[in-house]
Amino acid sequence: MIEWQPNRLWYHDSPFKQWGIDINLRMSVIRLSGGELLIYNPTALSDTLLIELESLGRIKAIVTVNEHLHHHLSDWWLKFPDAYFFAAPGLELKRTDIGFDAPLSSQNHDLWRKDLYQSMFVLSERQSETIFCDPESKTLIIGTTLAQFNQGSLSRQLLGVLTARYFHAGCSPSIQVQSDPKTLLRQSLQEILSWPFERILPLHGSPIPKRGKHALTHAFSWALNA
């Protein structure tokens, strides 16, 4: 794992292919004020990763923020039976084998209310995802709505060029088509941009280590200026 903020925030990248290209899948690990850990977007649970996690502390909450990225949940469910499991909207219906404690929403849960900002990034009436902001590390932890492909394999970087996500972070072209009307998206962006962050950890692609608000504003300028 990579330590993003000393003693507070880490991330782990694992392979993930889309269109035959490895765009990586990122898991974030946050140490809450009580010392326990919150897992954002659990990835494949290897022996090496397990050892690293155990060295950091006890896992309190496991948060799956995208209803399509749940393939490794069973391993986490079996390994951490005492943790609280939270599901993206709709995931409870897909994964009836997992005893989720609660669905995610725009409301902060009591387990991390004192530590994190939380909201639903509403892209359209049918599409949304839960995002967090950690004010201590000034980091926005976001799902699949934002990415930059300027590192890694040549094919990944070519994908960045072809989708205008190489020189700047951007959103998937399909989001622009689906986000109509844009009122809900603008409202979400206005809330998120009021949060105290300078860096961004997206689920795919490269981390964004600086000028995070500028990156988010640039990526969604088509919605903010509509």
Image (cartoon, rainbow, N blue to C red):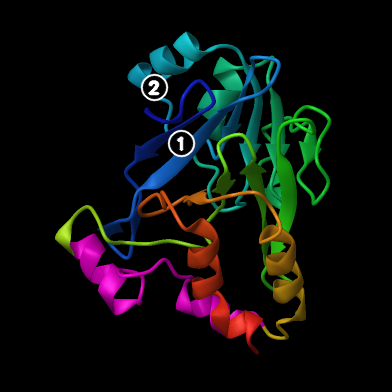
Residue 48 image offset from top left, x and y in percent: 34, 18
Q: Residue shown at 78%/27% (left/top)?
A: 111
Judge by depth and name the residue closer to the eye, 225 or 141: 225
Quadrant of the rendered structure where residue 17 is?
Answer: bottom left
- Pointers 1 and 2 in contact (C-beta within 8 Å): yes
Does the segment drawn in magenta span residue 166? Answer: yes
Examine the rendered structure and indicate whether residue 193 appears above or below residue 208. below
Mark yes or no: residue 4 visible.
yes
Residue 196 image offset from top left, x and y in percent: 65, 49
Residue behind mark 1: 43
Q: Residue shown at 51%/78% (left/top)?
A: 174
Quadrant of the rendered structure where residue 191 is?
Answer: bottom right
Residue behind mark 2: 49
Q: For the N terminus, which image quadrant?
A: top left
Q: Amino acid at mark 1?
A: Thr
Residue 207 image offset from top left, x and y in percent: 40, 49
